[in-house]
Image (cartoon, helix red, strand yellow):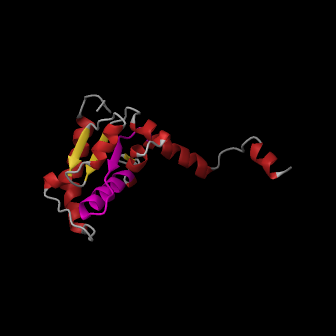
Amino acid sequence: MTHSQQTLAAPAAASPAQAALRETQQRYAQLPLVYACSGCSSAAQLANQLALRLDHQGLAEMSCIAGVASDVKPLVRTARSGRPILALDGCALHCVRHALARQEVRPRVHVDFSRHAVAKDLHRLPSAQECEATWHSVVLPALETLLQDGGPAAQPA
């Protein structure tokens, strides 16, 4: 049997690892989405780090805002799926909110870290203390608002 014939052959039963991956994907598909700024400032990287933390702790599924902004179809479909969205912008430029609006999506909860006294410094990463303080004072309350809000999920911009 050639390699291409092997590829086309009926798939074998799912391995335990494949089954676990499928289960994880199904669980994440039920979570709210989080999009974050990931620019070059400390505030942008703080937004990115905290979105990753939400994802890694299974509290939200992080998706790619660059893909949404650049019209990558599967990522736009995810943004338009109707799942509740938390948008984390590092500064008042609101790149995440604007990228979503470009696809006619409005997040249920939008956070601008500059309104929470988060410094926007170039050439510096956020400190562990900044991450922890912003996690507890900004991100977790925003997630709680997102989960309690009975309004529509992703709305037209």
What residue is rendered at 34% in x and 33% in y?
A: 104
Place of residue 10 in the rendered image (x, y in percent of width and height, measured from the top left): 75, 40
Q: Is 140 inside the magenta-drawn segment?
A: no
The answer to whether 117 is drawn above or below residue 152 in the figure is below
Q: Which of these two is toward me, 104 or 57?
A: 104
Which residue in the rendered view is the most extreme toward the bottom?
A: 123
Place of residue 76 in the rendered image (x, y in percent of width and height, measured from the top left): 43, 39
Quarter containing the C terminus: top left
- In the picture, measured across the screen, residue 149 lies left or right of residue 105, that is left
Q: Which of these two is toward me, 138 or 17?
A: 138
Place of residue 130 in the rendered image (x, y in percent of width and height, measured from the top left): 21, 64
- In the picture, measured across the screen, residue 46 lies left or right of residue 58, that is left
Place of residue 107 in the rendered image (x, y in percent of width and height, measured from the top left): 29, 38
The answer to whether 19 is drawn above or below residue 150 in the figure is below
What residue is rendered at 54% in x and 48% in y?
A: 21
Q: Is 33 inside the magenta-drawn segment?
A: yes
- In the picture, measured across the screen, residue 26 lies left or right of residue 18, that is left
Count of numbered circles on the image: 0
Where residue 116 sits, quadrant-wise, is bottom left
What residue is rendered at 24% in x and 43% in y?
A: 110
Q: Which of these two is toward me, 10 or 117?
A: 117
Q: Which residues are magenta?
A: 29-55
What residue is rendered at 20% in x and 53% in y?
A: 113
The answer to whether 128 is drawn above or below residue 5 in the figure is below
Q: Which of these two is toward me, 74 or 18?
A: 74
Where residue 52 sits, quadrant-wise, is bottom left
